[in-house]
Image: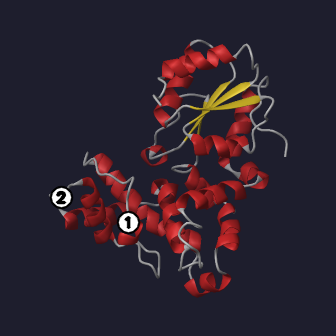
Amino acid sequence: MMTRTPQAKANEIRLKRHLHHGSFVLVEGRDDRLFLEQFADSEECRVTVANGKDNVVEVVAILEADRFPGIVGIVDADFDHYEGIESSSENLVVLETVDLEAMLIRSPALDRVLVELGSTNKIAKFGRDVRETLVAAAVRIGCLRLHSRQSELHLKFSKLRYRAFVDKGTLATRDRDLVRAVMNLSGRPDLPLDDIARKIADIRSSLDDPWLLCYGADMVKILAFGLRRTLGTNDARAVAPGVVRQCLRLAFGWSDMNNSRLGRDIRYWEARNPSYRVLGAE
Protein backbone atom coordinates (compact mmCIF):
# COMPACT_ATOMS: atom_id res chain seq x y z
CA MET A 1 0.00 0.00 0.00
CA MET A 2 1.34 3.41 -0.93
CA THR A 3 2.28 5.61 2.03
CA ARG A 4 0.36 8.86 2.14
CA THR A 5 2.30 12.09 1.90
CA PRO A 6 2.28 14.47 4.88
CA GLN A 7 0.04 16.83 2.92
CA ALA A 8 -2.42 14.01 2.21
CA LYS A 9 -2.39 12.98 5.87
CA ALA A 10 -3.00 16.58 6.93
CA ASN A 11 -5.95 16.79 4.51
CA GLU A 12 -7.33 13.55 5.91
CA ILE A 13 -7.28 14.97 9.43
CA ARG A 14 -8.93 18.20 8.27
CA LEU A 15 -11.77 16.19 6.70
CA LYS A 16 -12.30 14.28 9.94
CA ARG A 17 -12.74 17.44 12.00
CA HIS A 18 -16.48 17.67 11.26
CA LEU A 19 -16.88 14.14 12.69
CA HIS A 20 -14.51 14.45 15.64
CA HIS A 21 -14.17 17.64 17.67
CA GLY A 22 -11.56 16.34 20.08
CA SER A 23 -7.81 15.88 19.80
CA PHE A 24 -5.85 14.20 17.03
CA VAL A 25 -2.62 12.47 18.05
CA LEU A 26 -0.08 11.59 15.39
CA VAL A 27 2.34 8.73 16.07
CA GLU A 28 5.10 7.14 14.01
CA GLY A 29 3.87 3.58 13.62
CA ARG A 30 1.45 0.81 14.48
CA ASP A 31 3.14 -0.21 17.74
CA ASP A 32 3.03 3.40 18.93
CA ARG A 33 -0.70 3.53 18.16
CA LEU A 34 -1.42 0.26 19.98
CA PHE A 35 0.56 1.48 22.98
CA LEU A 36 -1.09 4.89 23.22
CA GLU A 37 -4.61 3.60 22.68
CA GLN A 38 -4.30 1.72 25.98
CA PHE A 39 -4.31 5.11 27.72
CA ALA A 40 -6.13 7.43 25.31
CA ASP A 41 -9.62 8.76 25.96
CA SER A 42 -11.57 6.89 23.30
CA GLU A 43 -14.24 9.59 23.10
CA GLU A 44 -12.01 12.65 23.12
CA CYS A 45 -8.92 11.45 21.23
CA ARG A 46 -8.15 9.92 17.84
CA VAL A 47 -4.74 8.30 17.34
CA THR A 48 -3.47 8.13 13.77
CA VAL A 49 -0.30 6.69 12.24
CA ALA A 50 1.83 8.99 10.08
CA ASN A 51 4.43 6.35 9.10
CA GLY A 52 7.67 7.79 10.44
CA LYS A 53 9.04 10.58 12.58
CA ASP A 54 9.63 13.01 9.73
CA ASN A 55 6.02 12.63 8.62
CA VAL A 56 4.71 13.30 12.13
CA VAL A 57 6.79 16.47 12.36
CA GLU A 58 5.72 17.67 8.91
CA VAL A 59 2.01 16.98 9.37
CA VAL A 60 2.03 18.86 12.67
CA ALA A 61 3.81 21.79 10.98
CA ILE A 62 1.27 21.85 8.11
CA LEU A 63 -1.71 21.87 10.47
CA GLU A 64 -0.11 24.44 12.78
CA ALA A 65 0.36 26.76 9.80
CA ASP A 66 -3.40 26.50 9.21
CA ARG A 67 -4.07 27.16 12.91
CA PHE A 68 -5.73 23.74 13.15
CA PRO A 69 -6.49 23.19 16.85
CA GLY A 70 -6.11 20.06 18.94
CA ILE A 71 -3.23 18.43 17.06
CA VAL A 72 -0.25 16.84 18.83
CA GLY A 73 2.51 14.55 17.58
CA ILE A 74 4.47 12.00 19.62
CA VAL A 75 7.88 10.99 18.27
CA ASP A 76 10.95 8.97 19.21
CA ALA A 77 13.95 10.93 20.41
CA ASP A 78 16.39 8.96 18.24
CA PHE A 79 19.69 10.85 18.75
CA ASP A 80 18.02 14.22 19.47
CA HIS A 81 18.81 14.26 23.19
CA TYR A 82 22.40 13.19 22.55
CA GLU A 83 22.83 15.90 19.93
CA GLY A 84 21.04 18.57 21.96
CA ILE A 85 18.25 19.04 19.42
CA GLU A 86 15.15 20.68 20.89
CA SER A 87 11.59 20.06 19.78
CA SER A 88 10.52 22.33 16.93
CA SER A 89 6.96 22.77 18.20
CA GLU A 90 4.89 23.00 21.37
CA ASN A 91 2.63 20.44 19.71
CA LEU A 92 5.36 17.79 19.50
CA VAL A 93 6.05 15.46 22.41
CA VAL A 94 9.47 13.80 22.23
CA LEU A 95 10.07 10.58 24.14
CA GLU A 96 12.67 10.69 26.91
CA THR A 97 14.40 7.69 25.33
CA VAL A 98 15.61 6.85 21.83
CA ASP A 99 12.40 4.95 21.04
CA LEU A 100 9.26 3.50 22.61
CA GLU A 101 10.79 0.09 23.34
CA ALA A 102 13.61 1.73 25.30
CA MET A 103 11.04 3.59 27.41
CA LEU A 104 9.25 0.30 28.13
CA ILE A 105 12.47 -1.47 29.12
CA ARG A 106 13.46 1.44 31.33
CA SER A 107 10.13 1.13 33.16
CA PRO A 108 8.89 -1.54 35.61
CA ALA A 109 7.23 -3.25 32.62
CA LEU A 110 10.50 -5.14 32.08
CA ASP A 111 10.40 -6.60 35.58
CA ARG A 112 6.85 -7.86 35.01
CA VAL A 113 7.79 -9.44 31.70
CA LEU A 114 10.76 -11.19 33.31
CA VAL A 115 8.42 -12.68 35.91
CA GLU A 116 6.13 -13.93 33.15
CA LEU A 117 8.66 -15.15 30.59
CA GLY A 118 11.84 -15.64 32.58
CA SER A 119 13.07 -18.33 34.94
CA THR A 120 13.64 -17.28 38.54
CA ASN A 121 16.47 -19.78 38.90
CA LYS A 122 18.17 -18.82 35.65
CA ILE A 123 17.92 -15.10 36.36
CA ALA A 124 19.43 -15.68 39.81
CA LYS A 125 22.20 -17.77 38.27
CA PHE A 126 22.78 -15.04 35.67
CA GLY A 127 23.89 -12.88 38.58
CA ARG A 128 23.59 -9.53 36.81
CA ASP A 129 20.96 -6.81 36.65
CA VAL A 130 19.06 -7.62 33.45
CA ARG A 131 18.18 -4.03 32.62
CA GLU A 132 21.77 -2.84 33.05
CA THR A 133 22.96 -5.79 30.97
CA LEU A 134 20.62 -4.88 28.11
CA VAL A 135 21.75 -1.26 28.22
CA ALA A 136 25.43 -2.24 28.25
CA ALA A 137 24.92 -4.50 25.23
CA ALA A 138 22.67 -2.17 23.22
CA VAL A 139 24.75 0.96 23.74
CA ARG A 140 27.60 -0.63 21.76
CA ILE A 141 25.23 -1.04 18.81
CA GLY A 142 24.01 2.52 19.35
CA CYS A 143 27.59 3.78 19.21
CA LEU A 144 28.04 2.02 15.88
CA ARG A 145 24.76 3.46 14.59
CA LEU A 146 25.96 6.93 15.60
CA HIS A 147 29.36 6.45 13.99
CA SER A 148 27.71 5.26 10.78
CA ARG A 149 25.54 8.36 10.74
CA GLN A 150 28.30 10.80 11.56
CA SER A 151 30.71 9.28 9.04
CA GLU A 152 28.01 8.68 6.41
CA LEU A 153 28.84 4.97 6.17
CA HIS A 154 25.18 4.06 5.47
CA LEU A 155 25.48 0.80 7.38
CA LYS A 156 22.47 -1.50 7.65
CA PHE A 157 21.05 -2.75 10.93
CA SER A 158 17.48 -3.87 10.22
CA LYS A 159 18.19 -7.59 9.70
CA LEU A 160 21.04 -8.15 12.15
CA ARG A 161 21.52 -11.66 13.51
CA TYR A 162 22.19 -10.84 17.16
CA ARG A 163 23.46 -14.28 18.05
CA ALA A 164 26.45 -13.54 15.81
CA PHE A 165 27.81 -10.98 18.29
CA VAL A 166 25.91 -11.35 21.58
CA ASP A 167 27.50 -13.75 24.08
CA LYS A 168 24.95 -16.39 25.09
CA GLY A 169 26.17 -16.61 28.67
CA THR A 170 26.59 -12.93 29.55
CA LEU A 171 24.44 -11.24 26.85
CA ALA A 172 27.37 -8.87 26.29
CA THR A 173 28.11 -7.47 22.83
CA ARG A 174 31.44 -8.38 21.26
CA ASP A 175 32.51 -5.25 19.37
CA ARG A 176 34.57 -6.88 16.64
CA ASP A 177 31.89 -9.47 15.95
CA LEU A 178 29.27 -6.71 15.90
CA VAL A 179 31.22 -4.67 13.38
CA ARG A 180 31.87 -7.75 11.25
CA ALA A 181 28.16 -8.67 11.25
CA VAL A 182 27.12 -5.15 10.25
CA MET A 183 29.81 -4.92 7.56
CA ASN A 184 28.65 -8.24 6.07
CA LEU A 185 24.99 -7.22 6.22
CA SER A 186 25.83 -3.89 4.58
CA GLY A 187 28.05 -5.36 1.88
CA ARG A 188 30.98 -3.25 3.11
CA PRO A 189 33.99 -5.60 3.52
CA ASP A 190 36.23 -2.67 2.59
CA LEU A 191 35.74 -0.90 5.92
CA PRO A 192 38.53 -1.00 8.56
CA LEU A 193 37.07 -3.35 11.18
CA ASP A 194 39.56 -2.62 13.97
CA ASP A 195 39.31 1.15 13.50
CA ILE A 196 35.53 1.02 13.75
CA ALA A 197 35.67 -1.21 16.83
CA ARG A 198 37.98 1.34 18.47
CA LYS A 199 35.56 4.11 17.51
CA ILE A 200 32.75 2.28 19.29
CA ALA A 201 34.91 2.11 22.42
CA ASP A 202 35.82 5.81 22.15
CA ILE A 203 32.20 6.93 21.82
CA ARG A 204 31.12 4.71 24.70
CA SER A 205 33.87 5.98 27.01
CA SER A 206 32.84 9.59 26.35
CA LEU A 207 29.15 8.93 27.01
CA ASP A 208 27.78 9.92 30.41
CA ASP A 209 24.30 8.49 29.91
CA PRO A 210 24.17 5.26 27.84
CA TRP A 211 20.39 5.55 27.46
CA LEU A 212 20.98 8.40 25.00
CA LEU A 213 22.20 5.91 22.40
CA CYS A 214 20.27 2.77 23.37
CA TYR A 215 17.74 1.68 20.80
CA GLY A 216 14.98 -0.30 22.46
CA ALA A 217 14.65 -2.32 19.26
CA ASP A 218 18.14 -3.68 19.96
CA MET A 219 17.37 -4.33 23.62
CA VAL A 220 14.17 -6.18 22.78
CA LYS A 221 16.00 -8.51 20.40
CA ILE A 222 18.79 -9.15 22.88
CA LEU A 223 16.19 -9.80 25.59
CA ALA A 224 14.32 -12.19 23.29
CA PHE A 225 17.61 -14.01 22.62
CA GLY A 226 18.31 -14.23 26.35
CA LEU A 227 14.85 -15.49 27.27
CA ARG A 228 15.42 -18.67 25.28
CA ARG A 229 18.13 -20.18 27.48
CA THR A 230 20.07 -17.58 29.48
CA LEU A 231 17.18 -15.97 31.35
CA GLY A 232 14.45 -18.52 30.67
CA THR A 233 13.52 -21.77 29.01
CA ASN A 234 11.40 -20.84 26.02
CA ASP A 235 10.81 -21.90 22.46
CA ALA A 236 12.12 -19.24 20.06
CA ARG A 237 8.61 -18.56 18.77
CA ALA A 238 7.26 -18.02 22.28
CA VAL A 239 9.74 -15.22 22.92
CA ALA A 240 10.11 -13.83 19.41
CA PRO A 241 10.91 -10.09 19.42
CA GLY A 242 7.35 -9.24 18.37
CA VAL A 243 5.95 -11.25 21.27
CA VAL A 244 8.34 -9.66 23.76
CA ARG A 245 7.52 -6.21 22.41
CA GLN A 246 3.80 -6.89 22.84
CA CYS A 247 4.32 -8.18 26.39
CA LEU A 248 6.27 -5.06 27.35
CA ARG A 249 3.58 -2.85 25.89
CA LEU A 250 0.81 -4.64 27.78
CA ALA A 251 2.82 -4.71 31.02
CA PHE A 252 3.15 -0.91 31.04
CA GLY A 253 0.37 0.33 33.31
CA TRP A 254 -1.18 3.58 34.40
CA SER A 255 1.27 4.07 37.25
CA ASP A 256 4.10 3.75 34.74
CA MET A 257 2.46 6.25 32.40
CA ASN A 258 1.87 8.74 35.19
CA ASN A 259 5.48 8.46 36.35
CA SER A 260 6.93 8.76 32.86
CA ARG A 261 8.09 11.91 31.14
CA LEU A 262 5.75 11.01 28.29
CA GLY A 263 2.75 11.04 30.60
CA ARG A 264 3.78 14.34 32.16
CA ASP A 265 4.42 15.94 28.77
CA ILE A 266 1.02 14.86 27.48
CA ARG A 267 -0.67 16.27 30.58
CA TYR A 268 1.26 19.50 30.09
CA TRP A 269 0.01 19.69 26.49
CA GLU A 270 -3.55 19.14 27.75
CA ALA A 271 -3.11 21.95 30.29
CA ARG A 272 -2.03 24.30 27.49
CA ASN A 273 -4.93 23.13 25.32
CA PRO A 274 -7.77 22.84 27.87
CA SER A 275 -10.43 22.14 25.23
CA TYR A 276 -8.72 18.90 24.26
CA ARG A 277 -7.87 15.63 26.00
CA VAL A 278 -5.53 12.82 25.07
CA LEU A 279 -5.32 10.57 28.12
CA GLY A 280 -8.37 8.97 29.66
CA ALA A 281 -9.15 8.14 33.26
CA GLU A 282 -7.34 5.33 35.04
Q: Is residue 282 visible?
A: yes
**Distance from Cα at disc 2 to Cα at disc 1:** 22 Å
Q: Secondary structure at mark 2?
A: loop
- The residue lying at 30 percent from left, 64 percent from top is 181
Residue 139: horizontal and vertical position, in percent? 44, 62
Task: Say which residue label 1 marks.
Answer: 205
Please say if 256 is above or below 10.
Answer: below
Tell me which amino acid carries mark 2: Leu
Q: Are marks 2 and 1 in contact (CB under 8 Å)?
A: no
Looking at the image, the residue that sits furthest to the right is 281
Left or right of residue 189: residue 241? right
Q: Secondary structure at mark 1?
A: helix
- The residue lying at 37 percent from left, 66 percent from top is 205
Q: Is residue 68 visible?
A: no
Looking at the image, the residue that sits furthest to the left is 190
Left or right of residue 32: residue 134? left
Left or right of residue 117: residue 10? left
Residue 30: horizontal and vertical position, in percent? 58, 41
First in residue order: circle 2 vs circle 1: 2
> How dense is the environment of label 2, judged by Cα within 10 Å: few (below 14), some, or many (20 and up)?
few
Q: What sort of colour scheme is used for the picture?
A: secondary structure
Please say if 149 is above or below 86.
Answer: below
Please give the count of numbered marks on the rendered protein: 2
Task: Please state which of residues 14 and 129 is positioned toward the viewer in this rendering.
Answer: 14
Task: Please state which of residues 224 and 153 is positioned toward the viewer in this rendering.
Answer: 224
Residue 163: horizontal and vertical position, in percent? 40, 71
Please say if 28 is above or below 8.
Answer: below
Tell me the tag on residue 134.
none
- The residue lying at 56 percent from left, 19 percent from top is 10
Tell me which amino acid carries mark 1: Ser
Task: Say which residue label 2 marks.
Answer: 191
Q: Where, by quadrant of the figure, is residue 19 drawn?
A: top right
